[in-house]
Amino acid sequence: MRAMDHPEFTAAALAERFSLQLQGDGATPVRGVATLASAGPGQLAFLANPRYRGQLATTAAAVVVVRAEDAGDVRGTALIARDPYVAFARISALFERVPARAPGIHPSAVVDPTAEVSPDAHIGPFVSIGARSKVAAGCVVGPGCVIGDDCELGEGCELQARVTLYTRVRLGKRVRILPGAVLGAAGFGLAMDAGHWVNVPQLGGVVVGDDCEIGANSCIDRGALDDTVLEEDVRIDNLVQIGHNVRIGAHTAMAGCSAAAGSAKIGRYCLVGGGAGILGHLEVADKVLVTAMSLVTHSIREPGEYSSGTPLTDNRTWRKNAARFKQLDALARRVIASSQRSPE
């Protein structure tokens, strides 16, 4: 892959390439992307959130991606999209600078003799690849990565700096893992015996489907017996913890600092907000949204939006309400008793 030096596209070319409707001068050049507030000549911006609609009147962007109902407020050239944010994401990719990665193994890398590395893969400096592991064509393994024994990387995977695949990790095609992530470490399996903890051996692995992305410093533990599984197109943000034997359905996304405890099963097309937690051995249906900082303490059987916790308030009010929390059980008992009394 080679970086494009200062790419430039016309508005008409972008409209044709991404099946967008053009309004205005199709010859308008686009050399980069920015927000409505910061964009200047030669840059493309977008409007997805209605709260920023007022910025259409003042933006200096050369081209703006909007919905049809907002196109009349664009002073210059517009590209009309059903979902401007998705269109903007696809256009932005044209301007992403990707450094060239020549195939080959860096002299400082250590590769076990039983490992199989495609000649088309890029293995960076100070990489370690363990016994019987396989790295397919088009893979990029960045500096300082550790690939343990019996791991597999499908075609086109990218491991950025200091990624660790501990053992028995199998990646599908085009999986992208950001710096510092650890996959395949031992799950948190413990048994108590006579006042002392005994570790439960973690004999499974981790299976990651095609087109998944795993954020920086996230951890995905290997299974105790069966594998921990991420189906295709799962997106994991930074600092996310996935416990052993968790299964995450296709196209689900988990935001930063969220966590799923051991043996939880999360459905397809779910969204888990930042800092949210899902307790172990629970099931979450497809198309569930768990809002930020919520704690899922029971299985969710129906699609929808779910929240827990108390809203932010001033500390004085919170202290008063916290003191009353202890009285809720007694109050509930009085209400039940009152409702059960026979009328006089």
Image (cartoon, rainbow, N blue to C red):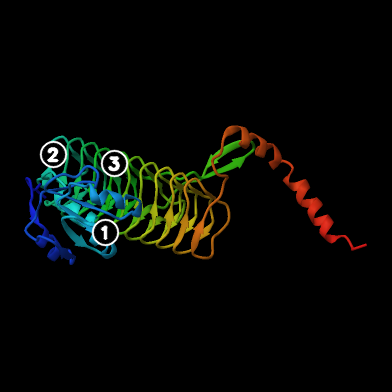
| Residue drawn at 84 percent across, 56 percent down | 338
How packed mark 2 is, by other alpha carbons closer than 10 Å (few <14, some 14-19, many 20 or more), is some
Q: Mark 3 points at which residue?
A: 163
Q: In this view, does 223 lie to the left or right of 49?
A: right
Q: Which residue corresponds to the image point at 10% horizontal and 45% vertical from the top-left?
A: 100
- Tell me where residue 134 appears, x and y as whole percent: 23, 52
Label disc, if present, on residue 317 of the rendered structure? none
Query: Residue 298's x, y, as percent?
Result: 58, 56
Q: Which of marks 1 and 3 is nearer the N terminus?
A: 1
Amino acid under disc 1: Pro
**Residue tagged by mark 1?**
84
Relative image position of residue 169 (x, y in whole percent): 33, 51
Residue 239, percent across and down? 39, 41
Q: Sequence-wise, which precedes: disc 2 or disc 1?
A: 1
Q: Which of 133 and 338 is in front in this view?
A: 338
Quarter of the image holding residue 250? bottom left
Cα–Cα gap, marks 1 and 3:
34 Å
**Residue labelled with disc 2:** 106
Give the structural element (helix, strand or loop) at label 1: helix
Query: Is there CB contact under 8 Å for labels 3 and 2?
Result: no
Is there CB contact under 8 Å for labels 2 and 1?
no
Q: Quadrant of the C terminus?
A: bottom right
Q: What element carries label 2?
A: loop
**Spatial separation of the CA atoms under disc 2 and disc 1:** 42 Å
Query: Can residue 277 be seen by looking at this rendering?
Result: yes
Residue drawn at point x = 76 percent, y = 51 percent: 332
Q: Is residue 280 above or below residue 251?
A: above
